[in-house]
Amino acid sequence: MAVGAASLDGRGGVWMLFMKDDGTVKEFSIFGHERGGFTGSLDISDAFAWSLYCLDDLDGDGDDIDLAVGVRNDGDSVF
């Protein structure tokens, strides 16, 4: 299970929860600013993980579903 948590410091993270059959958390990992191998650039006000969206197997590798992570206030992106 993936849970987006835009934290009070504005950076936030994605919590990947690996569940037991009884519905409790077996283990977890956090992906975000300086955690979980994330190498992107985030500012304090970006609110990384404001939203999440399941993309199924976007890259076609057949392994896992892919996940889009929303950043609420990212002013660095150029559209």
Image: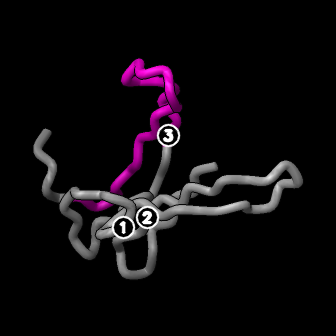
Q: How is the image coloured?
A: one colour
Q: Position of residue 69 (x, y in %)?
A: 40, 48
Looking at the rendered image, the disc whose residue lies closer to the viewer, 1 or 3, is: 1
Residue at the right extreme, as displayed: 22
Q: How many marks?
A: 3
Q: Amino acid at mark 2?
A: Gly
Q: Position of residue 19 (x, y in %)?
A: 73, 53
The mark that comes first in sequence, 1 or 3, is 1
Q: CA distance from mark 1 to mark 3?
A: 20 Å
Q: Residues within 10 Å of mark 3 (few under 14, many from 20)?
A: few
Are discs 1 and 2 less than 8 Å apart at CB? yes
Tag 1 secondary structure:
loop
Tag 2 secondary structure:
strand
The mark that comes first in sequence, 1 or 2, is 2
Residue at the bottom extreme, as displayed: 9
Looking at the rendered image, the disc whose residue lies closer to the viewer, 2 or 3, is: 2
Looking at the rendered image, the disc whose residue lies closer to the viewer, 1 or 2, is: 1
Q: Position of residue 78 (x, y in %)?
A: 11, 44
The residue carrying mark 1 is 35
Badge number at residue 53: 3
Give the magenta range. Answer: 53-74
The residue carrying mark 2 is 13
Q: Amino acid at mark 1?
A: Arg
Query: Residue at (80%, 61%) from the top-left corner?
Result: 24
Are discs 1 and 3 less than 8 Å apart at CB? no
Judge from the rendering whether residue 16 lies leftward or rightward of residue 8; answer left or right.
Answer: right
Judge from the rendering whether residue 38 lies leftward or rightward of residue 25; answer left or right.
Answer: left
